[in-house]
Structure formats: C-alpha cells, structure tokens
Amino acid sequence: MHIDCFIPYHGAAQAQATIALLRASQAVRQVWLLAPQDAPAPQADDGPYLPVGSLHSTDALKAIARHASARYVLLCLRPAGLHPGRFALERLVRVADDTGAALVYSDRYVLHEGRHVPAPVIDYQRGSLRDDFDFGPLVLVRTGALQQAVAGMDTAYTHAGWYDLRLRLSEQAPIVHINEYLYTEEEGGREAGQFDYVDPRNRAVQLEMEDACTAHLRRIGAWLPPRDRRIDLHEGGFAHEASVIIPVRNRVRTIADALQSALGQHTTFPYNVIVVDNHSTDGTTEAIRRHADDPRLVHIIPRETTLGIGGCWNEAVCHPACGRFAVQLDSDDVYASPDTLQRIVDAFHDQQCAMLVGSYSLTDLDLRPLPPGIIDHREWTDANGHNNLLRVNGMGAPRAFYTPLLRRITVPDTSYGEDYALALAFSRRYRIGRLYDVLYLCRRWEGNSDAALDTAKANAHNLYKDRLRTWEVEARIRENATQAHEGGTEHTAY
C-alpha cells in the first residue's frame, strides 16, 4: 500500500462515498479526515481524523506530514465529492515513481447536470507562480518531499500554507501534469474570481501570498532589490508630449465613445490620438473617419492583416507621430475625466519613471458601477511590487510608457498578455510609477475579448502568462548571477 489520503470532512453525506472509493483501492493504506477544529468529530467508522483547519494553514500541513507514513500522500484540496476512475490512484503512483516528481496531478471530469464535462488543466512550469494555479482538487505528493518542505516552513501561515508548500515542492523535484482524465469531481464550490486578489476584503490573504512568493524568489535566486533608478525623460525630440494609443478591430458600438474621451482631454501640451484600425469590417473604420477633420487624429490601417493587439501597439509606437509618452486606451473604455492625460504626463515628470500605471473602475457599457468597483492594485509597492508582479495576473490601467524605452523593448504581437509582458520587462530594469486615483473606466460587456471564456481559451491564456513568468524568472536568475560574478554592476540590455 503506497498512499495515505487526507480529505476535508464537512459531513458524512459529502465524505462517505469518496471514503469508500478510496478504501477500495489496493494502493491506499489509510484515509484521514481533516475536520475543522470547531466542527463535530466524524463518526468513528468514517476513519481517523485530524482536528485541523484547511490545507491553507501551515499547521495543518505539518500535522499531515507528521501522520503520513506511506510513500505518498493524496491531498484533496477542496471539499467536493470525488470519484477516482479504475486504477487512477495506481496511475498517479506509477507516474510519480517513473518521473521522481514531488507532486503529480491530472485532468478530471466535472459532473454537471448528470453529464461528465472534461475539465483539463495546464502543465506546471517554473513560472507557474499564481497562487490560484488550478491543479484540480486532487494531488499526489511524495511523502519525503512533503516532510522536507514542511521542515523548512518557519512562517506559520493561516492562508498561504498550501501555496508555500507547492512552491517548496517545486524547488525539490518536478511537478508533473498527467494529461489523462483520472477522476470525476462533483460540481460545487466557487472558483477564484478574476479580481479576487485586488478585493480589499482579501488583503490579509494577499499579504501572506506575497510573503510566500517573495521567499520562494529569494530561495531560487530570482528576487530583485527595489528598482529606484530615475529616468531621464528628455531623450530625442518629439512634436507631441503624449499619444493616446487605441488599437481597434470591430468595435463600432464603442469606438466613438473612446475617441470622444481621448480627443476631449484638456492638456497644457500638444498630444495626439493614434488609432490602429486592424482591418475592421463592421463600420468601425467609417466611425473613425468621422473624426478625420481633427488634426490630432492619426488613423493607421496596417498593411499586415495578422497583427494582434501587441502588433498594433508596435505600429503606433514606431510611427513618427508618436509622442514622448504612449498612453493606453482600449476601444471599449473611456478616461474618467478630461484631465486624465495631463495627470499621467505630470506624474511621469514628477516620478521620473519608465512606465506608469493608474487605477480604474469597473462599469457596464452605460458607466454604471460593477463589483468589485475600484481596481487600484494597492498591493503594488515600490519595495516589492516588481517581485510580487510574478504572482499576480496584472497591475492595472491605464498603462503608459516612455516611448524611447518602449521602442527598444517592443510589444509581443499577441492579443492577450502583451501588457503583462511589458510590465514584467519594464519592472525588471526600471521603476514603475503609480497613480492610485481612478483615471479610467473599464467597461465590461459581452463584446469584451475576455468575456465568457471557455476552458480551452482560459487554459491557453493562463499557460501563456505562466510562460511569460517562466522566461522572466529565468532572466532574473541569470541577471542576478551575472551581477554577483561581476561585482554587482547593473546592466541594461534594452
């Protein structure tokens, strides 16, 4: 028998079927129930139990490590009914044995209205640093790796215990994804929301997650000290101090509002609006041309027909008319007031930063507020924001860049994550400026590019951002190693 199982206990009805299935496997030595400390104890015939909190606490994981004696530990991460397939547990063990993995996990089905709906997950890589990375509810951990990891846990987390554990496991040996559907999960519970990590109610959780991630980056050599170098913002000659950049394709319903917002800015400096019209076919092009009599409007239709949003940004930034600062405005959105552009440029000069990010408010198409409301990314700090950025999925809007540096770095030609890639690259070298007042209204509607994503598209997006993080982690490790070898001299590759 190779496995000790530890599953959350929230009542007999939820647990008994899962317990019976696990005990039926010849691979299982023992099934432990994790009962909340203030909950009634399980029935004696349900099996032994540990009176611990959730797996998110360090104390619970240490208790599991003390009681585990089989070669592997099976952890159920969520209190859902689980139905392992025939020989599923044996398959997990075999792959763990073959690969020497510290942790293995698999795809699964979710039981939805009587149907088995495929719920694939993505491969784990070095940059899979999001604390909400989806392993599914079931993971197999090598007991020796678990015990070694918890032995090094000198911070007792209430919320970040599991996150701390899997980061430490990834430092020991591979984390392996078995892309086979090995079990079924009964539908229930709440998935993490897109804006959970910026919800003020989750601040205590996020501080713990940041601490665990920062410690991991230190251990692997990817942590960076504060980026406090000021930027000389007077490079080159620019006819315009700023350019509002609007990439657009088929947004006839919203482009007029975006243009009116951009062209309605009140500034003490000359600016223009560069619209990169990515071969629209729905009347967007004609809507843009209605503003052709305004000399500040630069309307570009690229020669290439395969550009993503990032490629459209490159078209605008490399255009001779682009101003000293390139300022984002998505074709769905509007600025919060006519002084937004002035405030952004003033902040650049005041903070002497290479990139600047404001705050925004979520609204519907008619500008009615939507929860959670203001997204200000106050988790960003000058001391550690550039490290914590490797854990979170973004850093806010509107984003603005010092054009000479943006021209050197360039924007990845993709339609998702290109802004995140830039934030990672800029923050590795330069100080990022922040404005925490609301400058931008982000309008959510059914036409948004990230609305109602299916599992395949959401997985593709997450995989790409994890890849960006992986490349960035590797770059930071290499840079730290080079600086240590050369006596701490900072290099600039851009």
Image (cartoon, rainbow, N blue to C red):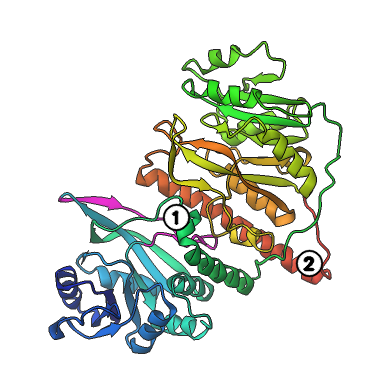
Residue 293, x across and y down, in percent: 67, 10
Left or right position of 299 against 183:
right
Residue at the (72%, 15%) spot, across then down: 295
Residue type, label 2:
Gln
- Front disc: 2 or 1: 1
Above or below residue 323? Residue 184 is below
**Pointers 2 and 1 in contact (CB under 8 A)?**
no
Residue at the (64%, 46%) spot, across then down: 357
Residue 483, disc: 2
Residue type, label 1:
Asp
Q: Which secondary structure, mark 1?
A: helix
Left or right position of 418 against 196:
right
Residue 31, x across and y down, in percent: 23, 81
The foreground one among 124 and 110 is 110
Residue at the (77%, 49%) spot, across then down: 351
**What is the crowding at mark 2: few (fewer than 14 residues within 10 Å), some, or many (at least 20)?**
few
The quarter of the displayed image where residue 339 is located: top right
The quarter of the displayed image where residue 325 is located: top right
The quarter of the displayed image where residue 111 is located: bottom left
- Give the Cα separation between the discs numbered 2 and 1: 36 Å
Q: Is residue 61 magenta?
A: no
Left or right position of 311 against 182:
right
Report the predominant secondary structure element of the magenta stretch.
Answer: loop
Q: Which residues are magenta?
A: 114-135
Residue 435, x across and y down, in percent: 66, 47
Residue marked by disc 1: 196
Q: Is residue 121 magenta?
A: yes
Left or right position of 212 against 176:
right
Q: For residue 277, say whether it is visible.
A: no
Q: Which secondary structure, mark 2?
A: helix
